[in-house]
Image (cartoon, rainbow, N blue to C red):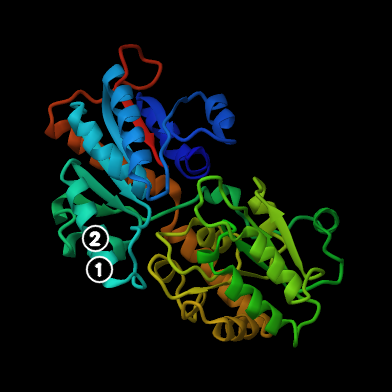
């Protein structure tokens, strides 16, 4: 979907353009498409669907094959599970020389029923036969991919995840700036601590557990406020957004929970926070945690793949069991009731973000692999943008 491209893929697309590629995007067109086009990228609407309707997937496959036959792409780089399942065989069928898939998080996870897990592993294994290389963001996903024979070790790499560290700073805005932001969000001046959560407004992000835990936290910290940043996407099958808001009312917390919706000023909002929380049921390698650490916030997250690679339990934050509201409340209270611990964890998280989660390094890892694939297939690497000559075309996309 164009949301994924705008918020997660643009840095990679811009880096490839600087290398000399002509970069196109194939995805569902929605609210973020204009921003992508303003950035100078051609967007080809493909109706990828997150549903289990095979007819919708066949339509997307036919649309993508038509696009790949009209355009002479040198590289197809697929993202998101459904789009990648369709794009890999489509690209190989159309003779695209280089096909890559970045797994931002496999659909199956520790909580998946065994037979469902086996089905998804089988599908991933079959689809990856049509690709030249597999990137995973999570190191655990790389181990799974190799162990389950989705990809051989020489054809897979964990690239991690990263953010533009320059955008996120632990330096607080002026008191006047913070006061203005509080007024904008409807948070009273004396309301503290502030716990922030950035995630799509869907059940699997752990919103119900978070609300139960926050309700318990307020018994000892009645002035605490929760700032929830995010909204459900048009492609989400989960329609829990209204139920999540209703649960806030059920818990009598309407005056303590702020729904900020989709925002583009995340660094500014993180400056308000005392603690970041992400109690997801499953993740790939969540960027929101990295952003929070880069802003100097301690983190409470669930002990799942991705999250436990980012959060050092007891050092940069705390990890809790999945779907365990009491444990979540206890972890939040432990950090928020100890100012020294909160500060130490925030500083340790900031150092970890700077050492391990710079998006420039993540992009460079991908570029090195792409250069090796060009050499392997006797393809000419593009000239630097603006130096003349025909640029190889790279297409990326996701559902």
Nearer-the-camera pick, 332 or 164:
332
Quadrant in which residue 144 is drawn: bottom left
Quadrant in which residue 300 is drawn: bottom right
Determine whether 333 is above or below 184 in the image. below
Q: Which mark is residue 119?
A: 2
Quadrant in which residue 284 is drawn: bottom left
Q: Position of residue 208 (x, y in %)?
A: 60, 72
Asked whether residue 124 appears in the rendered view, the answer is yes
Nearer-the-camera pick, 204 or 116:
116
Q: Which residue is labeled 1 in the image?
A: 115
Nearer-the-camera pick, 240 or 384:
240
Q: Residue at x 26, y 41 (%)?
A: 100
Q: Quadrant of the C terminus?
A: top left
Whether residues under marks 2 and 1 lie with C-beta atoms below 8 angstroms apart, the answer is yes
Q: Position of residue 204 (x, y in %)?
A: 50, 65
Determine whether 19 is above or below 281 in the image. above
Dot 2, how many residues are within 10 Å of its Cα: few (below 14), some (14-19), or many (20+)?
Answer: few
Dot 1, how many residues are within 10 Å of its Cα: few (below 14), some (14-19), or many (20+)?
Answer: few
Q: Which mark is residue 289?
A: none
């Amino acid at each position: 979907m164009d949301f994924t491209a705008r918020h997660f893929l643009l840095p990679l697309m811009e880096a490839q353009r600087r290398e000399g590629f002509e970069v196109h995007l194939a995805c569902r067109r929605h609210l973020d498409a204009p921003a992508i086009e303003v950035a100078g990228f051609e967007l080809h609407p493909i109706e990828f669907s997150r549903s289990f309707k095979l007819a919708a997937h066949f339509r997307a496959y036919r649309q993508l094959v038509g696009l790949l036959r009209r355009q002479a792409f040198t590289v197809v780089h697929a993202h998101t599970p459904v789009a990648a399942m369709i794009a890999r065989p489509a690209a190989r069928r159309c003779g695209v020389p280089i096909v890559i898939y970045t797994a931002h998080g496999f659909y199956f996870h520790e909580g998946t029923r065994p037979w469902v897990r086996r089905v998804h592993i089988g599908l991933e294994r079959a689809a990856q036969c049509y690709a030249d290389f597999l990137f995973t963001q999570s190191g655990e996903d790389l181990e799974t991919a190799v162990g389950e024979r989705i990809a051989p070790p020489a054809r897979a790499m964990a690239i991690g995840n990263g953010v533009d560290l320059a955008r996120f700073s632990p330096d607080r805005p002026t008191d006047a700036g913070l006061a203005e932001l509080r007024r904008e969000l409807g948070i009273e001046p004396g309301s503290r601590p502030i716990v922030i959560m950035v995630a799509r407004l869907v059940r699997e992000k752990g919103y119900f557990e978070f609300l139960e835990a926050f309700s318990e936290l307020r018994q000892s910290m009645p002035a605490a406020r929760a700032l929830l940043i995010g909204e459900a996407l048009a492609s989400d099958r989960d329609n829990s957004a209204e139920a999540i808001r209703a649960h806030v009312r059920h818990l009598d917390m309407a005056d303590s929970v702020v729904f900020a919706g989709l925002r583009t000023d995340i660094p500014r909002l993180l400056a308000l926070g005392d603690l970041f929380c992400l109690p997801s049921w499953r993740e790939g390698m969540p960027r929101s945690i990295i952003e929070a650490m880069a802003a100097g916030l301690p983190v409470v997250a669930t002990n799942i793949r991705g999250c436990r690679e980012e959060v050092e339990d007891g050092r940069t934050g705390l990890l809790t069991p999945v779907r365990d509201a009491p444990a979540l409340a206890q972890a939040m209270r432990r950090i928020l009731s100890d100012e020294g611990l909160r500060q130490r964890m925030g500083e340790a998280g900031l150092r970890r973000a700077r050492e391990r989660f710079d998006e420039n390094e993540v992009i460079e890892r991908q570029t090195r692999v792409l250069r090796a694939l060009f050499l392997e297939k006797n393809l000419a690497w593009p000239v630097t943008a603006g130096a003349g000559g025909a640029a190889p075309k790279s297409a990326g996309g996701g559902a």
